[in-house]
Amino acid sequence: MLKLHLIGDLQDLEAGLKLLSHEYKFEESEAGIPLEIQKSLVKDKLSISYDGQKGIIEYTSKNSFFRLLNLWLYQYKKNTTFSVQEKDCFDKTGVMVDASRNAVVSVSGMKLVLNYMAKLGLNLVMLYTEDTYEVKEYPYFGYLRGRYTHEEMKEMDDYAFELGIEMVPCIQTLGHLFNALKYEYANGIKDTSDVVLVGETKTYEFLENLIQSATKPFRSNHIHIGMDEAFGLGTGVYRSKNGIRDSFTIMNEHLEKVIAITKKHGLEAMIWSDMYYRFGSKTGDYYDLESDIPEEVINDIPDVDMVLWDYYHEDEKTYDILLGKHKEMKKKVIFAGGVWTWNGIAPNYGKSFETTKAGLASAKKNGIREVFATLWGDDGGETPILSALPGLQLFADLSYRDEVGEAQMREEFQYNTGYSLKKFMLLNDFDETPGVMENNLNTSAASKFLLWQDPLLGLYDQTVAGLGLGEHYQNLSIQLKELVSKENDLTPLFEFYHTLAVVLSVKAELGIRLKTAYDTDNKDALKNEVEQMKALQRSLNELRIAHRNVWMEYNKPFGWEVLDIRYGGTISRMSTAVDRVTDYLNGKLDEISELKENKLPFSNPYYLGEGTLGRGLYKDMVTPSKLSDV
């Protein structure tokens, strides 16, 4: 093992070094290579060097030290001498971890994420919890949802602190509170099903308890109080009590009261900017480049930082315009990009890379000093969080460099994770399939809808017919098998995705084969598909277990029940399909009504577009009937 003699004032760094010792794989010894650790006197001067005898690391902050140490070790492994410079492009750069879409990252899972963040030099983690944190005054708040206890949040914050990472609570204080407001205790503080009732004393008692509970375990005096997409604001109970009032006035009155609470507790607050930015758009579009926010609106906005969330555009100019218009609101502007862990059941690296490059280039140009990448988990948190690693490395590297070379990123990623970036990027091929544009910029999600769609109803069958997706996933499964044998933190991730590719190699075109065989009265082909479906039932259960394994590796168990139900439904429908086709072949049925239907291409304008096969929520993929409703 490499021996290093670290020289310098290490008092602030020792605890973090101990936490990351298994990551860096070196032994501290006075007989080792001298490595001098120096605090830089220049704000953004970061450098590493080795002259063949002695090494130097010149850093500015804890987090930059851990990044530079990682880079020093990487450079030492490949070069006899070296000298590398980087710079702090931002004061804060990090990630937002979504713990509100069923997948609540466990404490051990969070420590794993923090380890990777530290090696990359990220210094901010936003913990997005709508109702998944403990509020002792409201026992039903986050009930059976895997909510974090005060002690768990403190443990994560302590760990992050030693790595130079600020952990910031990211909560909701207006909308996005459906799960929190669905219980009886919320009567009297609820406007609509997911928006609190503005103006009520009980509402602000509730919110103050939330704010205190969310912030008390953390060192940071910052808090993200949400307030995005509260489209039902003032339209429910509020309207019956107060009549019709314009949403800007209601929003402002509410924000003033919440900011008064945060100031009372010594907190600096930020909000998602969309509700205010939309006031300047004639169509209410958040990304309206013609938006003109009235001066009177700007002057009346309470004292709060504005977070622009945009992970949709690939052109720098769009970000320039949006950031410029945000700066006109006379507040500190923070930029939130994204690593697309919410595309479906697999990550979308093409979209992530293109939006990250454009967004961060614009942020630098426009003097934005705080940025973070969101890791949303829309529709059940199906995509494992550590699938984000390629996107996180690019985001981090662009936070310290003007640009990132492809070869450089490949080599450093291999060193950081033990995996070839090219191999890791195979996960992108689950959705960037034949029929999809390069980089999947319009966010096709074939792997999700092909996994969950019904074998007899086949809502997407006409959309994917003729594309050869079965062969595509068969080839993908062969390539992914090479990654399964490794034994490390990411092994469960690749075991899951390999099994998914195996299932999709058969299931992707199952409905098409069934329909063709039925329409041509090919009994032999139907018999063959019955055997395929029986085997698929077993494969789907193997996939369920592999998915469960990776879930439990990184997340709390709560929320997994939703995916168990989805897998159970898929396996059960396969059983029904076997029985119905078998009964038809045995003469018990004169026809199979589901297969007799003329199948149409999937139609949903919100989820379709050029260069995409479509995407959607689970409920839209499995049935055209009501899944659950009155």
Image (cartoon, rainbow, N blue to C red):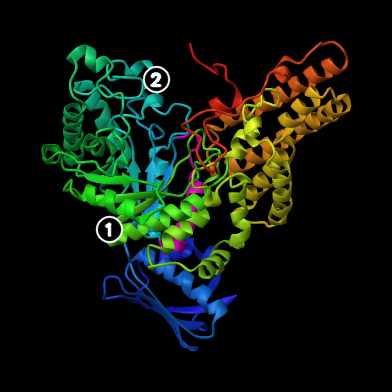
Relative to 397, 585 lies left or right: right
Classified by dominant secondary structure, the portion drawn in magenta counts as: helix
Q: Position of residue 432 (x, y in %)?
A: 59, 47
Question: Image quadrant for the N terminus?
Answer: bottom right
Q: Height in image: 337 above or below 595?
A: below
Q: Is residue 220 visible?
A: no
Residue that mark 2 sits on: 182
What SS does tag 1 mark?
loop
Determine whether, in the image, residue 464 is placed left or right of residue 267.
Answer: right
Q: Nearer the viewer, residue 322 or 304?
A: 322
Image side of residue 612 versus residue 129, left or right: right
Looking at the image, which residue is at 17% across and 21% down? 245
Q: Give residue 583's quadrant in the image.
A: top right
Q: Is residue 628 magenta?
A: no
Give the SS element for disc 2.
Answer: loop
Q: Which residues are magenta?
A: 101-121
Residue 36: x, y in percent?
40, 80
The residue nearer to you, when weighing 526 against 69, is 526
Residue at the (75%, 30%) spot, across then down: 537
From mark 1 to mark 2, how far is it between C-alphas? 38 Å
Q: Amino acid at mark 1?
A: Arg
* Residue for point 75% across, 36% down: 539
Residue 226, quarter of the rendered image: top left
The stretch drawn in magenta includes residue 109: yes
Residue 185 visible (yes or no): yes
Mark linked to residue 369 = 1
Q: Position of residue 418 (x, y in %)?
A: 60, 63
